[in-house]
Amino acid sequence: MFADKLILRIPGPTPIPPRVQQAMARPMIGHRSGQFSELFARTAERLKPIFGTKQDVYILAGSGTSALELSVVNVLASGDEAVVLVSGAFGERFAKICERYGIIVHRLQVTWGEPVTPELLAPYLAERPQVKAVFATYCETSTGVLNPIRELAQVVREKSDALFIVDGVSCVGAVPCEMDEWGIDILVTGSQKAFMLPTGLAFVAVSERAWKVIDSRTPLAFYLDLKAYRKSFADRTTPYTPAVSLVFGLEEVCAMIEEEGLANIIRRHELMRDMTRAAMKALQLPLMTADAYASPTVTSVNPGEAFDPEALRKTLRTKHNVVIAGGQAHLTGKIFRIGHMGYCEPLDVIQVISAIEISLRQIGVDVPFGEGVKAAQEVLVNHV
């Protein structure tokens, strides 16, 4: 094996396109220079269609979790009440962030692998009229569920005056996203998923409705104070030192997205999802999520007692230089997850499925060679 030929198929960080790597290697410029201000302004403008918004999209140096915390601390204070939709590890993270700030959290929990549906949310929210915000996870990375954000947003509008705040970290840029049309008040994501960059940038868009709440408060946060980002944004910069090289890369990512077209990118991710799921079904490997709520960016598989997922992952990694993800929290050691987002195309999916078939045989699982690959190929060939 070539040590530098790692095949990374986890749901983030994802592979970085060579042209993006080259962009990030450009000579450093002053972060308070006019050159950076021009780069920053034109790049931030190009993020708006990806979010489906006319609002400004703020760029900060930080992980996706920093953006989650920012979305909490700027709209709520200790003693406020919030509903958090928990369908996996990252919904639970939202809840823990809220609790750290003394917010009273009402968890609407579902079994991991299932979505939070409008039918569950409507009565839950109607019974809690004092709630000031509802937090949701668009793609629950830990399970591969894509929650029905558009429909959930409609319920929040109809049943309450709460803000609707969405974690889009592992799917924005790869799935339909119409922040303004759907009624999302704060939408956040990170750089290391569908944006095909290293970890280190977070993106936040805020509705006019949310700004009215934010402007009425003085948050506990200093670095994560959204008003500071809005003030600096007007001057085409950030309040604190930006990650200049990552913004170089972001500009190139925006160019790639525009060249392929966002609609085509969404179709590509849906195709890779369908190929992966067809392959797992052909190999009789149980999927964690129903087809209707399956994420286009990550697929989770629960083999039960059939074999040890960690043995499969180890064999893939040590014998074939293929890296897939394991489970989180109570699913640790029980499932495996295949990432198919960002700098990934259908033939990459066929490659990882073939490697899974080989590795399963190598750990003693009697799967038929080629069945998963064939199923994926048929989805690809019949794709319209």
Image (cartoon, rainbow, N blue to C red):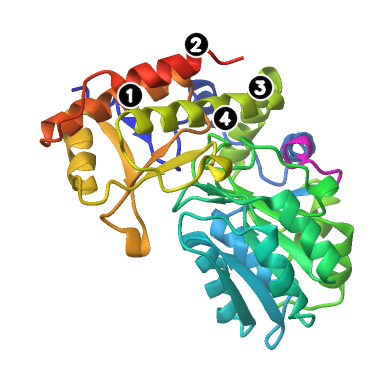
Q: Choose top left, top right, bottom left or bottom right for residue 99.
A: bottom right
- Give the alpha-carbon distance from disc 3 to disc 4, as whole Å: 10 Å
Query: Which amino acid, by three-letter code, is at mark 3?
Result: Asn
Would residue 201 appear left or right of 57 to someone viewing this image? Answer: left
- Tag 2 residue: 381
- Give the alpha-carbon distance from disc 2 to disc 1, as whole Å: 14 Å
x and y percent of residue 255 in the render?
68, 24
- Give the alpha-carbon distance from disc 2 to disc 3, as whole Å: 17 Å
Q: Choose top left, top right, bottom left or bottom right for residue 265.
A: top right
Can residue 188 be seen here? The reply is: yes
User: Disc 2 on helix, strand or loop?
Assistant: helix
**299, 242: nearer the viewer:** 299
- Give the alpha-carbon distance from disc 4 to disc 1, as whole Å: 18 Å
Neighbor class of circle 1 (other Cα within 10 Å; few <14, some 14-19, many 20+) is many
Mark 1 or mark 3: which comes first in sequence? 3
Mark 4 or mark 1: which comes first in sequence? 4
Q: Which residues are magenta?
A: 48-55
Callout in the foreground (1, 3)? 1
Quarter the N terminus occupies: top left
Q: Is residue 82 above or below residue 223?
A: below
Callout in the foreground (3, 4)? 4
Contact between marks 2 and 1 (CB within 8 A): the answer is: no
- Give the alpha-carbon distance from disc 2 to disc 4, as whole Å: 14 Å
- Tag 3 residue: 264
Neighbor class of circle 2 (other Cα within 10 Å; few <14, some 14-19, many 20+) is few
Q: Is residue 60 above or below residue 34?
A: below
x and y percent of residue 87 in the render?
52, 61
Residue at left 53%, top 34%? 196
- Tag 4 residue: 270
Callout in the foreground (2, 4)? 2
